[in-house]
Image (spheres, coloured by chain):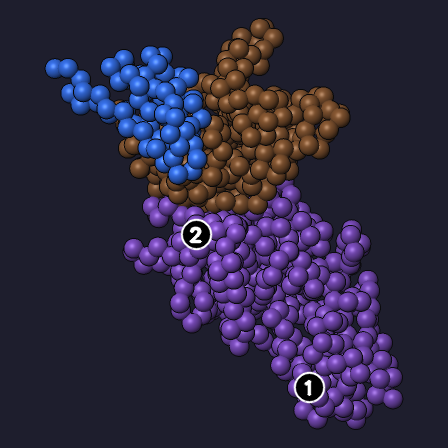
Amino acid sequence: MRSPGVYFQEGNLACAEGAMAAGLGFFAGYPITPASEVMHHLARTLPATGGRFIQMEDEIGSMAAITGASWTGLKSMTSTSGPGFSLMMENLGYAYMTETPCVIVNVQRAGPSTGQATKPGTGDVMQSRFGSHGDYEMIALSPNSVQEMFDFTVRAFNLAERYRTPVVLLADAGIGHMREKFTIPEDIEIVERKKPKEGDREFFHTDEKDHVPPMPSFGEGRELLVTGSTHRGDGTRDTAGYDTQDKLVRRLKAKIDDNQQDIIDWEEDSVEDAELVVVSYGSMSRPARGAVKRARKDGLNVGFFRPKVMWPSPEERLKEIGKNSKILLAELSLRGYRMEVERCVGSEKMHVYDRLNSLPTIDMIYTKIKEVMG
Amino acid sequence: MITGKELREKYIRNQPTAFCPGCGDGMVLNGMSRAVENLGIERKDIVAVSGIGCAAWVVSPYWRVDTLHTTHGRAIPHAIGVKVGNKDLNVVVVSGDGDCVGIGGNHLIHACRNNIDLTVIMINNGLYAMTGGQVAPTTEHGEKTITTPYGNPSQGMDVAELVKAAGASHVARWTTYHMRELTKEVEYALEKKGLSFIEVITQCPTRTGKKDNLSTLEMLEWYKNNTSKNPEDGKITVGRSVDKERPEMADVIYEQIISAGGTLK
Amino acid sequence: MPQKIHIEIDRELCTGCGICIRFCPKDVLGESGTLNQYGNFYTEVKKLEECIVCRQCELYCPDFAISVEVKE
């Protein structure tokens, strides 16, 4: 683990450093391009910080292991890319249903299926939100720099612990494999999970406004019942009852919905009264921002909007922007965030610059901006 | 000697259970609870992990310890997270044959390879009971089930041999006819360092019973007559088949943390 | 001092599977012929005086319904 200071390193390493800075206690993973460097760095470095590292037999096992470890009181994480992320969907739903804090890093690559392992893509945006079955909500963050790989990993842990839920760090190969300067700050805000008081019996229900019940650990003598089946506040299963299902699934959703203001985050530039706003995220947002800068220099009235948190989406803000401006979504996939942005701004306002396999040049996006503006 | 009532009050919750009359799952739960009682292990130091199926219910919700009731076939990797997370805990996995070696077979193999200190109890009733009696990896060749109405075209798998090859440090097989031996075996497994695997051949009065027209008592009688501790008898071999020493993974991980200069989180 | 044996069978927990009756070496137990609230013919003690406190019935009961208590 590195001491505070300035470093020149790749995004995946910054992610691993961010995890350790946040207090990572358990990592389980399976090798996959382009995410492996996260686990390479942790395999070597995590033990000295007192954290446990294991390589599992597959991503199903990795997701399961971090869930189990989280119940021993440790902050836990796994890292993967598309094919592995698909395998994690089952137990990601389990972690959500059992309200188990954990962080899943998905360094996205070009899909579908095996696709192109070393090439970036952002085709997993919808999967990170809807990939597991049943009604659920997910928190997913999208970094666009090596600095944000560090910062957002810390934040992913903080959100996971704060809201007792799995959090996805939705990076891409462009960011994971890019090297640039980043800073490990002296002071880092760390959030710890809410622990129960002596005598508390309900760990899956709360009347608190934040909807987050306290979380005990195994070995405290509480005779815990943790289950992915529908359960009451004390953890006992109710395999058929209306009320239990209704209350639980609605509370889990409300936990994310009602705390949106604390979770969502974006950056914007010159959006007010812009004729066109370029929306982009992840590595693609870098040339996109460059194209916006050039357009403004050339006197075009173009703004820039970048969601830092993809889910829950900055829905209200996108709707506001869509009222007055045309939207150009620039992304490294055909359907990454498209449906969500289109839902917010309307199809008549919506324009898309999509690209596969690799980042475009600033010129290429700039040409599209001019085309859309007519 | 603890009485049945004392045992029930100390170890069991949420009764009456959902198990069918004569189900072997309750018997396994009985033996496990006695093993813990005989060893004097505190309940707070046990975490029981299970997957999906009737056998998963043995520990969740019925066993009065910390329980993690997980997804189908994934009890073992969840249990590995718990054990590596806190190796002071005694981690017990109870799993059916479909859960353990069907959908979860790969996890089982690798847990044995890791020789991680889990006690894995596989309750083998030879089919998928909860979902309606479908063919399982343990169903014998030619057996008729609801999904093999013309006879099982596949072969039943000897799971004890599989885990032996995969590297478990303790392997045993018993049936619900052998409750005393089973209880002793669970005791041994809880104390044994490394992966302990106990297969318990168990009657399913509802699925197997109906299919083969056998009562609970007839099935138990069958276990008595068709099992032997002597492999040369040509019957189902019961008893301990593996008992060896191998490095245990959680121990090694903890040692590596210490030697890297870390203080355990 | 003679032992005083008491066998308690929880009628509502007993599912009437008959395993305890089969495993009792002294035929102490038998079917009651009465249904409990779940519709099972629970087991009852027929010949308490024959009980040798081997506890086979407790050990084999899948439902934790039997308790053999001994008072000196």
Please rate how many residues cluster around mark 1, counting C-alpha atoms within 10 Å: few if below 14, some from 14 to 19, many from 20. Answer: many
What colour has chain C? blue
Above or below, comparing residue B12 to residue A220 in the picture: above
State which tag comes first along the sequence, 1 or 2.
2
Same subunit, labels 1 and 2: the answer reads yes
What colour has chain B? brown
What amino acid does circle 2 point to?
A: Gly
In the image, which lettered chain appears purple? A
Q: Is residue B134 left or right of residue A346?
A: left
Along the line of sight, which residue is nearer the eye, C47 or A367?
C47
Q: Is residue C7 left or right of residue C1?
A: right
What amino acid does circle 1 point to?
A: Ile
Q: In this orientation, does residue B43 appear?
A: yes
Q: Which residue is mark 1?
A: A321
Q: Residue A235: which numbered mark, if any?
A: 2
Residue in the picture at 38% in, 35% down: C36
Where residue C17 appears, x then y in whole percent? 44, 26
Where residue A72 appears, x then y in whole percent? 43, 48
Image depth: mark 1 or mark 2 in front = 2
Q: Quadrant of residue B255?
A: top left
Above or below, comparing residue A185 to residue A1 in the picture: below
Q: CA distance from mark 1 to mark 2?
A: 44 Å
Along the line of sight, which residue is nearer the eye, A80 or A164?
A164
Residues under numbered marks 1 and 2 in contact, where contact means CB atoms less than 8 Å apart: no
Where residue A311 appears, x then y in whole percent? 62, 69
Query: Farthest residue in the left direction?
Result: C1
Along the line of sight, which residue is nearer the eye, A46 or B11?
B11
Q: Secondary structure at mark 2?
A: loop
Q: In this orientation, does residue B114 appear?
A: no
